[in-house]
Amino acid sequence: MLKPLIPEDESLRHAFQWLAEQGHCTLNTVEQASLRFDLGPRDEEFLLRQFVYHHGAASDAPNSER
């Protein structure tokens, strides 16, 4: 069986929800969530994998289509 994507830890769950509401997430956005919800390095890495690395590291790069 697959595990649900939503984390069980309350602080991490709130951070996950907050990031989902932000739309476009960058390294800075995840860092803000980590500080705002008092997350540890392991939780921050989880959020980075879900919101930044999963969508490509280019999400933090300047728009190159110009």
Image: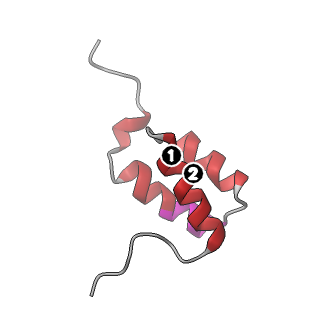
Q: Where is residue 17 in the image (x, y as percent from the top left)?
A: 53, 56
Q: Which amino acid does label 1 sit on?
A: Glu
- Please identify the quarter of the rendering in which residue 14 is found: bottom right
30 left or right of 55 in image: right
What amino acid is found at the position of numbered circle 2 in the picture? Trp
Q: On the image, numbered disc 2 is attached to which residue? A: 18
At 50% from the left and 45% from the top, the residue drawn is 21
The residue depicted at 38 percent of the width and 51 percent of the height is 53
Position of 62 compared to 42: left or right? left
Left or right of residue 61, residue 8 in this image:
right
Q: In this view, does 27 lie above or below 34?
A: above
How far across and how far down the image is residue 9, in percent? 60, 75
Quarter-of-image position of residue 23: top left
Quadrant location, the C terminus: top left
Which residue is at a point 38% across and 76% down the rendered structure image? Answer: 4
CB atoms of marks 2 and 1 within 8 Å: yes
Residue 45: image tag? none
Residue 51, image x and y in percent? 43, 51
Residue 55, placed above or below residue 3: above
The residue closer to the viewer here, 10 or 41, is: 10
Tag 2 secondary structure: helix
Q: Nearer the viewer, residue 40 or 7?
A: 7
Determine if the magenta segment contains residue 44.
Answer: yes
Left or right, residue 16 beside residue 40 = left
Tell me the element at label 1: helix
Q: Mark 1 points at which residue?
A: 21
Residue positioned 29% across, 82% down in the render: 2
Q: Does the magenta stretch include residue 11?
A: no
Tell me how far mark 2 sits from mark 1, CA to CA: 5 Å
The crowding category of the residue bearing disc 2, from other C-alpha atoms within 10 Å (few below 14, some 14 to 19, many at least 20), is some
Residue range in magenta is 40-46
Q: 65 or 18: which is nearer to us?
A: 18
